[in-house]
Amino acid sequence: MTQPVWNDVDDYISGLLVGPDEALENALAASDRAGLPQINVAPNHGKLLNLIARIHGARRILEFGTLAGYSTIWLARALPADGELITLEADPHHAEVAKGNIAAAGLADRVEVKVGKALDTLPTLDGTFDLFFIDADKANNPAYVRWALDHSRPGTVIIVDNVVRGGRVLDADSTDPSVVGTRELATLLANEPRVSATMVQTVGGKGYDGFALVVVDS
């Protein structure tokens, strides 16, 4: 199978099961106009995040890595009217684009964009969260997950994106910080008694990658 086939299948799935969505399409267009990298989740993956949050009944979500707010919109739509989503973005320009997209989607009342490096922002946050979506700098994924575990309850869900790295996760000798961080994350999850976890490979419009799905047991 080749990338064009993966693209066509993603388009087929999204056309049937996601469909047109003005707010999301406008968010992507605003991202392109602002010159942001095209690294948002695919539409069918965005809907997967939404469905997981809905199945879980999440009321409080923390997202690492806002970019233009595309995945933020998908997750925030799963919240009840009194729910809360906090999203962390290191780049002030990205954050401003995201704020506009979130407001245009009618979700500003339940989403707070915090600007700054996540490891600097996390100490300012209190309480536990029902769901974490981690899609930021991969080198710090182990630190993000450790923090998430300390701010979870039994049943909290943690999703970590981009954990296959096009297969490069197999390279134990890699010095790429994203690969090193991903391998450290896998080892952490394998040895963490508080969780049940798996990793799933994916192919599609975004290439060959995957995500980790974690449930906190205790």
Image (cartoon, rainbow, N blue to C red):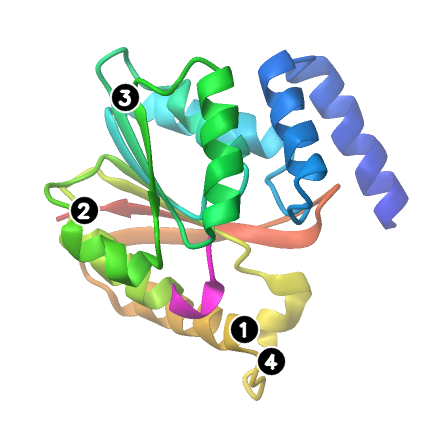
Q: Residues within 10 Å of mark 3 (few under 14, many from 20)?
A: some
**Three-letter residue code for mark 1:** Val
Residue carrying label 4: 171
Residue plotted at (44% across, 72% down): 181
Q: Which residue is mark 1?
A: 179
Discs 3/2, front? 3
In-image side of 175 versus 189 (left or right): right
Q: Quick one: label 2 or label 4, which is nearer the N terminus?
A: 4
Residue at figure coordinates x 60%, y 80% from the top left: 171
Instruction: From the viewer's side, name the closer residue of 4 and 114.
Output: 114
Q: Secondary structure at mark 3?
A: loop
What secondary structure predominates along the stretch shown in magenta? helix
Q: Are circles 1 and 2 on residues that touch, CB within 8 Å?
A: no
- Return the mark for residue 197: none
Res 94 visible: yes
Is label 1 in contact with label 4 (beta carbons under 8 Å)?
yes
Q: Position of residue 154 (x, y in %)?
A: 15, 41
Q: Which residue is mark 3?
A: 57
Query: Is residue 84 rendered to the left or right of residue 22?
Result: left
Residue 1 placement (x, y as % from top left):
86, 49
